[in-house]
Image (tube, rainbow, N blue to C red):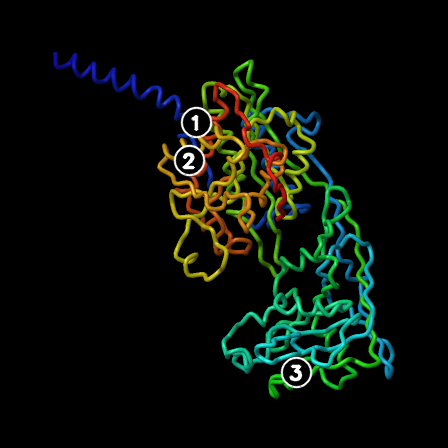
């Protein structure tokens, strides 16, 4: 009797557990130990930061194609196989053929080839700025503090030269604006509205000598790269915005500022010393000095790959529909000083996650009802171009894509360094918390998302899911190009951290336990959507939204 009771218990346990094991076979195959080798390769120095158009990106693409082949994913692009190549048109700053010419009454023309960067659309092949120059010190107009660098200075139609920050002592404390280390008057942004109102032809911005910086290149490699290139799929470059109609803004090297000031008898450092000593503006027109800046752009075409593979569904009536996973595999390249932007979390994590999710689906006895697609896109960091190209030139009918799951930065959790970094704008989550964006177009997609999170003991952070959130996160990753085609999207991330877009975003800083959980969660959401025995309805299409705008 006792043995019969135990046998009955065993049969009951087996009856309960077997369905669970069958359901969890795929998800249990997702292991941190399997993620790690992919991460070590994709985020290695040898891939040189996987910059779009680089050798490292091509190596990463071939690695992903080989993984897709090894997993037995179906290729659908004919002779290209898993690859989908497309062209990015790039206009880049041609430093060799760009120059500044300073002409003065008493001297021959001076030519400078030190770098300068236009804060404007780079759609023109050649841009010429020329005119008379006025020097306006720090460029401050502050009625409250009775400080005006523009008093009795006519800048209309002129080129205005200003320097960064505000009058300060040798320790860096402001001398006229409360004595603190920083105030709003120190930023270029706070200075420009008044300057714009006086209708100058252009504003030249130089870093003040006390800052220790001589050019924008020393301050932000990312900003110099952005300003020195214009990229597009159609060859037109960045679209002009209403702000572009304002006077031109140009950041210049301090060497050029010194050449412009030569006829004044002092260089920028000497003028700063005098202004800070007297605590009064020293502004003046540079009589007899004319400036001509010639910006030349050169054209390049980058042939860039996306990678796509497919698992066909098992239901004859639903297999034409596709649940599409996606992740971008490009990053920022190198910093030009020997450092590599490895992009471990951004976004080797999502890239590796897709490999393991594909493996999990292949580990199941049979595919889900719907087909499952795996799309690794390039050029996210420079404009979401890879996803845009696929959405406009899909390798499967666009109307057959039932839902999109985008994984971008899923490998980190908040740590003490994040909390102590002082870096603004961080959105990094703690363990078991995931930033969820999307699900707005389909109540079913949102419901399945919430069910899976609850079952896994995870908390969804929907703080940034408002499509009108000031930080516009809904519009800032690859899913947006599918949302605009009324396809339901889900974007999962653990958020930005102190190492975001720095050379410190390395593989050894990942939280592999939480990383594994994020990938498992992504798998389960997609598996449930792909297996849903009914229509995945779009009951709030983006095309019906009043505001469909948004940019990176």
Residue at x 55%, y 54% (from the top left corner): 501
Q: Earlier in the sequence, mark 2 or mark 3?
A: 2
> For the residues carrying marks 2 and 1, which lies nearer the camera in this image?
1
Q: Name the residue under label 3.
A: 281
Residue in the picture at 44% in, 39% down: 518
Nearest the viewer among 10 and 233 is: 233
Q: Residues under labels 3 and 1: Cα distance?
A: 70 Å
Image-quadrant location for residue 20: top left
Residue 156 against residue 406 in the figure, above or below: below
Using the image, determine if residue 362 lies above or below residue 147.
above
Residue 146, by quadrant, is: bottom right
Q: Which of marks 2 and 1 is nearer the N terminus?
A: 1
Q: How far apart are marks 2 and 3 (CA)?
A: 64 Å
Which one is closest to the eye, mark 3 or mark 1? 3
- Tell me which numbered mark, 3 or 1, is placed earlier along the sequence: 1
Residue 174, position as x, y percentages in the image: 54, 78
Q: Would you name the residue on which mark 1 appears? A: 26
Left or right? Give the position of 89 relative to 508.
Answer: right
Helix, strand or loop at mark 3: loop
Question: Above or below — where is 475 with respect to 531?
Answer: below
Q: Which of marks 2 and 3 is in front?
A: 3
Q: Name the residue under label 2.
A: 31
**Helix, strand or loop at mark 1:** helix
How far across and how far down the image is residue 445, in percent? 49, 30
Tell how many labels: 3
The Cα–Cα distance between marks 2 and 1, rounded to whole angstroms, is 11 Å
């Amino acid at each position: 009797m006792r043995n019969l009771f135990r046998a009955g218990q065993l049969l009951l346990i087996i009856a309960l557990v077997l369905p669970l094991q069958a359901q969890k076979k795929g998800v249990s195959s997702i292991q941190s130990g399997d993620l790690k080798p992919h991460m070590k390769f994709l985020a290695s120095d040898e891939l040189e930061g996987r910059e779009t158009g680089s050798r490292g990106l091509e190596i990463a693409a071939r690695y992903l194609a080989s993984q897709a082949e090894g997993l037995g994913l179906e290729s659908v692009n004919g002779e290209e196989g898993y690859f989908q190549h497309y062209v990015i048109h790039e206009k880049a700053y041609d430093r060799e053929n760009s120059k500044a010419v300073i002409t003065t009454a008493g001297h021959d023309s001076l030519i400078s080839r030190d770098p300068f960067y236009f804060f404007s659309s780079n759609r023109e092949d050649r841009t010429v700025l020329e005119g008379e120059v006025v020097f306006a010190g720090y460029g401050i107009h502050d009625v409250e503090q009775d400080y005006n660098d523009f008093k009795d200075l006519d800048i209309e139609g002129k080129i205005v030269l200003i320097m960064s920050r505000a009058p300060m002592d040798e320790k860096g404390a402001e001398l006229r604006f409360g004595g603190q280390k920083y105030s709003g008057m120190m930023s270029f942004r706070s200075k420009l509205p008044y300057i714009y109102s006086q209708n100058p032809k252009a504003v030249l911005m130089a870093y003040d000598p006390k800052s220790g910086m001589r050019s924008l290149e020393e301050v932000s490699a990312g900003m110099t790269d952005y300003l020195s290139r214009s990229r597009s799929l159609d060859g037109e470059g960045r679209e002009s915005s209403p702000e572009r109609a304002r006077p031109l803004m140009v950041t210049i090297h301090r060497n050029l500022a010194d050449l412009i000031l030569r006829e004044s008898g002092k260089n920028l450092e000497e003028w700063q010393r005098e202004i800070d000593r007297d605590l009064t503006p020293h502004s003046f027109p540079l009589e007899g000095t004319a400036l001509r800046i010639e910006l030349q752009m050169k054209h390049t075409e980058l042939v860039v790959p996306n990678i796509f593979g497919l698992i066909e569904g098992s239901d004859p009536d639903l297999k034409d529909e596709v649940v599409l996973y996606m992740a971008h595999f490009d990053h920022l390249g190198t910093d030009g000083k020997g450092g590599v932007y490895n992009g471990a979390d951004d976004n080797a994590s999502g890239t590796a996650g897709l490999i393991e999710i594909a493996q999990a689906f292949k580990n199941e006895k049979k595919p889900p009802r719907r087909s499952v697609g795996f799309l690794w896109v390039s050029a996210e960091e420079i404009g979401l171009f890879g996803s845009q190209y696929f959405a406009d030139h899909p390798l499967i009918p666009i109307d057959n894509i039932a839902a999109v799951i985008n994984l971008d930065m899923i490998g980190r959790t908040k740590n003490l360094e994040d909390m102590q970094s002082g870096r603004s704008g961080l959105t990094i989550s703690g363990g078991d918390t995931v930033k969820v964006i999307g699900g707005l177009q389909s109540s079913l997609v949102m419901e399945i998302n919430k069910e899976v999170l609850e079952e896994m003991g995870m908390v969804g952070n929907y703080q940034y899911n408002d499509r009108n959130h000031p930080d516009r996160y809904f519009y800032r990753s690859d899913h947006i190009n599918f949302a605009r085609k009324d396809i339901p999207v889900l974007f999962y991330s653990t958020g930005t951290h102190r190492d975001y877009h720095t050379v410190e975003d390395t593989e050894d800083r990942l939280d592999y336990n939480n990383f594994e959980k994020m990938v498992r969660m992504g798998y389960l959401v997609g598996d449930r959507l792909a297996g849903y025995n009914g229509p995945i309805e779009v009951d709030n299409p983006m095309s019906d939204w009043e505001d469909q705008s948004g940019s990176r």
